[in-house]
Amino acid sequence: MQKIRKGDKVVVLTGKDKGRTGEVIQVMPKEDRAVVRGVNMVKRHQRQTQSQEAGIINKEAPIHLSNIAVADPKDGKPTRVGFKIEGDKKVRVAKRSGVVIDG
């Protein structure tokens, strides 16, 4: 079970977007990276295709998992993630507040 999953609200800990929050769009576990909506934006030159126009577009670039932390469901501040067994399910828990992270 991964600590950061698609759909999680995360906080950026370092870099040019430090302190910004966003939702995880995609996780790449083999590269230890994630794409976060509205964070680590880069400009890309796009060639014209049948469906897309040519020009310079802004898109999210992957960010390393060590540079992001899950936002605590209680107060939105960065927290570490732990695991707990509730009944017969293994659930993710915010270390800061002890609240179960939905997902």
Image (spheres, grey):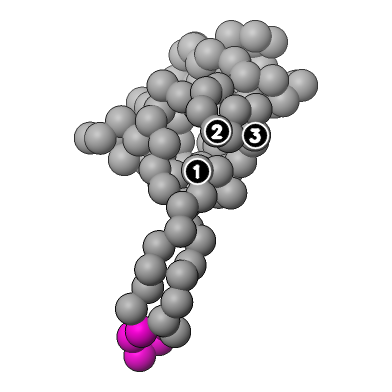
User: How far across and how far down the image is residue 23, in percent?
Assistant: 58, 43
Q: Which of disc 3 and disc 1 is earlier in sequence?
A: 3
Which quadrant is the C terminus positioned in?
top right
Q: Are marks 1 and 2 in contact (CB under 8 Å)?
A: yes
User: How far across and how far down the image is residue 99, in percent?
Assistant: 66, 17
Q: Which residue is the site of mark 1?
A: 40
Q: Is residue 7 visible?
A: no
Q: Which residue is located at x 58 percent, y 34 percent?
A: 17
Q: Which residue is located at x 76 percent, y 21 percent?
A: 75
Along the line of sight, the residue nearer the viewer: 31 or 102: 31
The answer to which quarter of the image holds residue 34 is top left
Q: Badge 3: how crowded within 10 Å, few (<14), some, or many (20+)?
A: some
Q: Are marks 3 and 2 in contact (CB under 8 Å)?
A: no
- Residue 16, numbered label: 2
Disc 2 residue type?
A: Lys
Q: Main secondary structure of the magenta part?
A: loop
Q: Which of disc 2 and disc 1 is earlier in sequence?
A: 2
Q: Which residue is the site of mark 3?
A: 20
Q: Where does the magenta region start and end?
A: 48-52
The answer for how far apart the CA atoms under marks 1 and 2 are is 8 Å
